[in-house]
Amino acid sequence: MADNINIMVDVVFDCNLCELEATDKFNAIKELTSKTKSLKMLSHPDKFQESVIKREENMSTGLGKGVAIAHGNCSKNEKLIVALGVSHKGIEFDAIDQKPVHILFLVANPPDSQKEYLQILSTIVGLLRNESFRRSLLKSNDPVSMNTRLRNSLNLSN
């Protein structure tokens, strides 16, 4: 699906946080940003977080079926970062089906990586259309195996 993304852009896939505590989208975005190592290491994590929240204020990225893919801009020289948070409680996200979100992807997009950014968004959406894949993400309690499974599904090298 995501052939050669690792060649085109240095993608950091970080899912070291399995369980989100926040139950509303803005606090969930803040929590995932603050607890995900690669996002905390952005040169301006506060500006990234603001760009994600501003986008969510304009239009929700809650896709339905318990999934949201929030995204925002980061600095020009940053890497494309994909982070994952899981909420068993559910997050009120103003999703198109009005149901809570349980799987939250957060994507940091450098302005010079638009093609790769769109490709990885498309690939993630394709994976999440599969109900058994979504269930497997929710059942996983091991961040390492979750990371491996997602990297393999996205054809990313470790």
Image: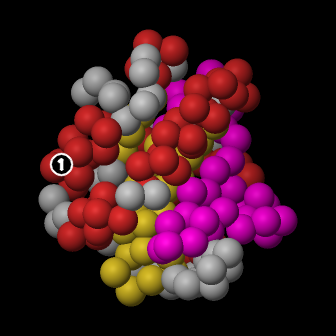
30 over 127 or under it: above or below:
below
Residue at 45% across / 83% down in the picture?
90
On the image, the x and y values in percent for residue 53 come to 71, 63
Regarding residue 29, the answer to whether it shows in the image is no
Would you say residue 77 sits in the magenta stretch?
A: yes
2 over 134 or under it: above or below:
above
Number of marks in picture: 1
On the image, the x and y values in percent for residue 121 come to 57, 42
Residue at 23% across / 45% down in the picture?
149
Q: Can you tell which quarter of the image residue 59 is in?
A: bottom right
On the image, the x and y values in percent for residue 144 come to 18, 48
Pick whichever, 56 or 138, lies toward us: 138
- Protein image colouring: secondary structure
Regarding residue 158, the answer to whether it shows in the image is yes
Pick whichever, 118 or 58, lies toward us: 118
Looking at the rendered structure, the secondary structure element under dot 1 is helix
Would you say residue 68 sits in the magenta stretch?
A: yes
42 over 11 or under it: above or below:
below
Residue at 64% across / 42% down in the picture?
44
Pick whichever, 112 or 44, lies toward us: 112
Residue at the far top in the pictured view = 7
Q: Amino acid at mark 1?
A: Val
Q: Quadrant of the N terminus?
A: top left
On the image, the x and y values in percent for residue 12 come to 41, 33
Q: Residue at label 1?
A: 144
108 over 85 or under it: above or below:
above
What is the span of residues highlighted in magenta in the rendered image?
Answer: 52-81
Question: What crowding class fits label 1: few (fewer than 14 Cα within 10 Å), some (14-19), or many (20 or more)?
Answer: few
